[in-house]
Amino acid sequence: MRQFGWPRGVAGAAAGWVMAHRGSNRERNRWVVSLLDLRPTDRVLEVGFGPGIAVGEMARVAGQVYGVDHSSVMLRAARRRNAAAVRAGRVSLFHAPVDRLPGLTGLDVIVSVNSLGFWPEPGERLRELRGLLRDGGRIALASQPRCLGASAETTERAGRELSELLAAAGFVDLRTETLELAPPVACILGTNRL
């Protein structure tokens, strides 16, 4: 299970393959991207891009997609998966943890799918991310709990926790969307108002 949080070596590559090919993972990422209402002028950052599924979906619409992931194994996988968009300069992916982001500002959208649980001090990280968004910029945090016995109640609890973290970081106009998988996925969307 640790390999899904921080993929390393051969076992990490295998975990990345599972993440990229599991139907529920692909559906979850596509669904989250569909909630973003992306425009061709948007500059988007994904924190914890894993094998790059959402990066590829966002690159079809957004003008520029950036991504950070603390796993070099996932960086290689995501660059391969999105090689054409990387070569075209529409996708830039970085090997960096969330607490040491590259110098990005004026972003339109920030998204993170099932990675916040691996962040050090998530509340502080969310405040830092808010500082990277333009006025009116949007954030989306998605969680599909993967713990043993996860249920709709587990997802509801995770959604409430994400919502509370976003509110404490200063995001407004929070709303929750749910995708009925087993277990369900909660996506909390918010807006940055300066």
Image (cartoon, rainbow, N blue to C red):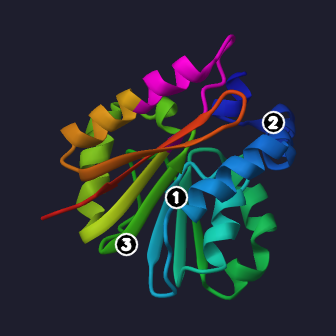
Q: Earlier in the sequence, mark 3 or mark 2?
A: 2
Residue drawn at (63%, 76%) of the image: 59
In the picture, the disc for residue 46 is 1
Residue 56 located within the stretch drawn in magenta: no
Compared to 111, does 38 lie above or below? below
For marks 1 and 2, the one nearer the N-term is: 2
134 with respect to 97 (left or right): left
Which of the two marks, 1 or 3, is nearer to us in this view? Answer: 3
Rendering quarter of residue 83:
bottom right
Q: How many badges with numbers are in the image?
A: 3
Label pair 1/3, CB-CB below 8 angstroms = no
- What's the residue type where badge 2 is placed? Ala
The answer to whether residue 157 is magenta is yes
Q: CA distance from mark 3 to mark 2?
A: 31 Å
**In the rendered view, does 175 fall on the left or right side of 14?**
left
Which residue is pictured at 44% across the width and 53% down the height?
A: 140
Q: Which residue is mark 3?
A: 108
Distance, label 1 to label 2, CA atoms, is 19 Å
- x, y percentage for residue 25? 74, 44
Q: Earlier in the sequence, mark 1 or mark 3?
A: 1
Label 1 element class: strand
Per the image, the residue denoted by label 2 is 15
Q: Amino acid at mark 3?
A: Asp
Instruction: Give coordinates of residue 142: x percent, y percent.
Output: 52, 43
| Callouts 1 and 2 close, C-beta under 8 Å | no
Q: Nearer the viewer, residue 110 or 163?
A: 163
Q: From this viewpoint, is residue 94 visible?
A: no
Relative to 30, say whether 90 is above or below. Answer: below
Question: Where does the magenta region start and end?
Answer: 142-159
